[in-house]
Image (cartoon, rainbow, N blue to C red):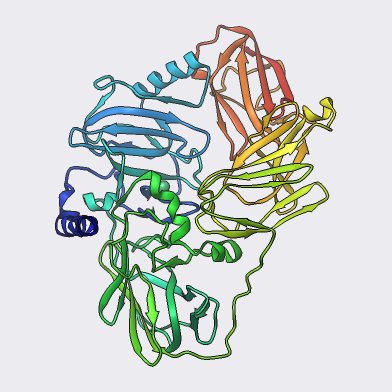
Amino acid sequence: MRKTTLFIPCLLIWISGVFGQNMYPKDYFNPPLKIPIVLAGTFGELRSSHFHSGIDFKTQNKQGLPVHTAAEGYVSRIKVSLFGYGKAIYVTHPNGYTTVYAHMQNFNKKIDSFLKKKQYLNESYEIQIFPKKDLLSVYKDEVIGYSGNTGSSSAPHLHFEIRDTETEKIINPMLFGLHSSDHKKPIISGLRAMVLNDSSQVNSSGLAIPLKLKEKEKGNYYCSPIHAYGAIGFSIHTFDQQDAAFNKNGVYKIEMRVNGKTFYAHKMETFSFAESKFINLLVDYPYQYHHKKKYQKTYVHPKSNLSIYEITNEKGLLMIKDSISYAVEIIVSDFAGNISNIKIPIQGKKTTPRITPTCKTTDHLIRVDRKYKLKTKEVEILFPKNSCYDDFYLHFEKEKDKFKIHEPSIPMKRDFEIRFNVRNIPDSIRKKTYIAKVVKNKYFNYCTTKKTDSVFSTETKQLGTYQLYQDWKGPNIYNCNFYHNQNIKKFKFLNICSIDKLSGIKSYRGEIDGEWILMEYNPKTHAFTYNLSDKILSKGKHSFAFVTEDNVGNTSTYSALFYTN
Ligand SMILES: [Zn+2]
């Protein structure tokens, strides 16, 4: 039995090694923008709690550049969301791949009017549609829409993906020939030695330590000889820059060799959305939380199901023996094949005394293989089986109304539940109450709160501080772009802003003469916009009404009359 299971991964490596990069068609897809390719982000780049699933084309710091279909096909999905991809469109091609274009400003006339009809029918700006094959066919290089900055995008750009249509696995678009000019070697800006069990050590330390790097020639980094003993590993901070931009992009491949033999390797060729969460085990998560810097490990966490790894027996782990020396090399490459490396000489040496880790034990040991319930008069915290990747001691503390449920320095695998006893809260106050995640002691972010008469509960993967909080005020409405009774004949848009600083805006509705109008909501600017070309208004007096509701049910209303003479 064992022989069979060992054989399968080896076969897979062999197949992907031999055929891997060649199986993607190199000239099938055209770049979606007709300007020189400059990337603001690469495939597999480390983002918060996920790997970047596409490439980000820079759009010359502006919105509204024509976006062309990469190849012929049909529009198989249109999704408009306030966060994430914003306005996104999916095109399915006959060769088995689907391309995705996200953060768009808008779509071409045909698609836009198709979408608007559905939005008016559903009375909702946010929508997801799966048009049938042949309904919205597109030809290669057709202008499908215009680039924008919608959704969770912090600057104008086009996010572009290629997916296997059947499996929905995302594939690095660079493997299809879409890449920019890159002659710069990746930069390695940090190295840390990781101590992987209680009896191991690096430079007499039982804790992870930073190692100083010297760059002797461009891309060739050296580290002074270290002495170590037992199970150790490394983590590095690295990024890549392309010729035409200063953006710090992700690298393509990282490999670690020990005495010339590959101990660890991964490359950003393809992965599935389901495995993206394992980024939390690839990066040094506690270090990232405390120092806001992403170091990636050159060893594999045993619970990681990432498929980007080349399988080796060692999984990046070094077992350093006394009196033996080792030559470690970490090699980082970008997609263009520019290479940087670090050489780390290690001398096996067991020393005493050494700095030792102190494990802070508490009454609450959260174990991977067991459920755990923490109960007080006011709260119950329920961890299901497999809620974490590694066993840990949970630090729990109550301070006034705040409940500190550890700190967010440990990645959780599954949601845990926080239940607040609300039996003693009067009904009138309970109505305005929600569960808040307290950030920096001053923000009370709304957590989806399930309410019964006796318990308010929420499910989350985020350790941290929580408390019950009240929101008594409806959203603030401001900056309407016309005044009451104004003639707006020359206007193209109606604009208004609304913000709710506590529980946040849950829903909104705009109406003209009592009928729903499509108002596009941009949560980054708090703006709600109606395009007056949606409907021809008769000459004369019209009424405009706008209502926003927060997450505990407080509402605010703005109404005004306008003329179109
Ligand atoms: Zn992107």
Q: Horizontally, is 24 left or right of 227 in the view?
A: left
Question: Which residue occupies the foreground of this view, 131 or 144?
Answer: 131
User: Vertically, is 492 above or below 448?
Assistant: above
The image position of residue 174, as x and y in percent, is 27, 53
Q: Horizontally, is 45 left or right of 526 in the view?
A: left
The image position of residue 495, as x and y in percent, is 61, 27
Q: Count how many numbered circles sit on residues in the image.
A: 0
User: Vertically, is 428 above or below 177?
Assistant: above
* Residue at image coords 61%, 33%: 527
Question: Which residue occupies the foreground of this view, 417 or 441?
Answer: 417
- In the rendered image, the residue lying farthest to the front is 1
The image position of residue 159, as x and y in percent, is 39, 44
Residue 58 visible somewhere in the drawing: no
* Residue at image coords 41%, 21%: 115
Residue 133, image quadrant: top left
The image position of residue 74, as x and y in percent, is 26, 27
Q: Which quadrant would the N terminus be assigned to in this image? A: bottom left
Residue 396 visible somewhere in the drawing: yes
User: Vertically, is 209 above or below 114?
Assistant: below
Q: Which quadrant would the C terminus be assigned to in this image? A: top right
* Residue at image coords 21%, 32%: 72
